[in-house]
Amino acid sequence: MTNVASTLSGRKPSVEWETPQELFDLLHAEFGFTLDPCATPENAKCPRYFTREQDGLAQSWAGERVFLNPPYGSEAPLWVEKAVTECRTAGALVVCLIVPRTDTRWWHEHCAHAAEIRLLKGRVRFRNPGNPADRPQDPSAVVVFDPDAPPGRPTRLTFWDWQAKAGRGR
């Protein structure tokens, strides 16, 4: 997500955007998360989390129920690839909140293995304390990698009005 104000001021735009609590709460109620591998102490959504310094990509997620809102930008495909690997080889259930880059190779290579893809209605208003005036510029999707999904089953695609479920109807 590009931050115009940061670009004009010469500051590098942040790639870390905090998930709105009510969206996380809906997903957590459904999936029961145990790990947030892309967090800061200020925005961690789970008691167990990894910071940038701990490098969640280098850590095991074995057997965890993972909430993954990866840094935006060029790092996102690495995190989605890690989600697929941890699901397949370590039994992790991984729920990714990502930009649906359906025009990219990585989306088709990795998200084709998802049990479910939910395209979110509207734009998610992520928090970035360093950039409080930013507006959402991209759509979002929830991509679920479930180790218990039957092999060869087609990916389930749904359109999800999460705001209505959270009581914030638009």
Image (cartoon, helix red, strand yellow):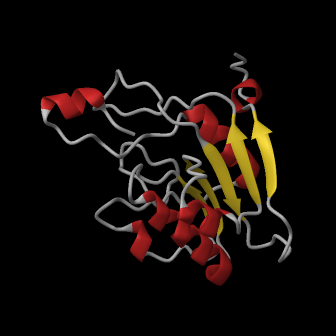
Image position, residue 134 (x, y; %): 37, 25
Query: Is 146 placed above or below 59 here?
Result: above
How many numbered marks does the figure carry?
A: 0
- Quadrant where the C terminus lies? top right
Residue at 34% over, 37% down = 2
Rendering quarter of residue 81? bottom right
- Quadrant where the N terminus lies? top left
Image position, residue 93 (x, y; %): 67, 66
Rendering quarter of residue 141? top right
Query: Is 72 placed above or below 21 here?
Result: below
- Most foreground residue, 58 or 13: 13
- Most foreground residue, 94 or 72: 72
Residue at 77% over, 63% down = 115
Residue at 16% over, 37% down = 11
Image position, residue 36 (x, y; %): 50, 57
Image position, residue 130 (x, y; %): 28, 32
In the picture, measured across the screen, residue 96 lies left or right of residue 117, that is: left
In the picture, measured across the screen, residue 65 lies left or right of residue 75, that is: right
Q: Residue furthest front?
A: 103
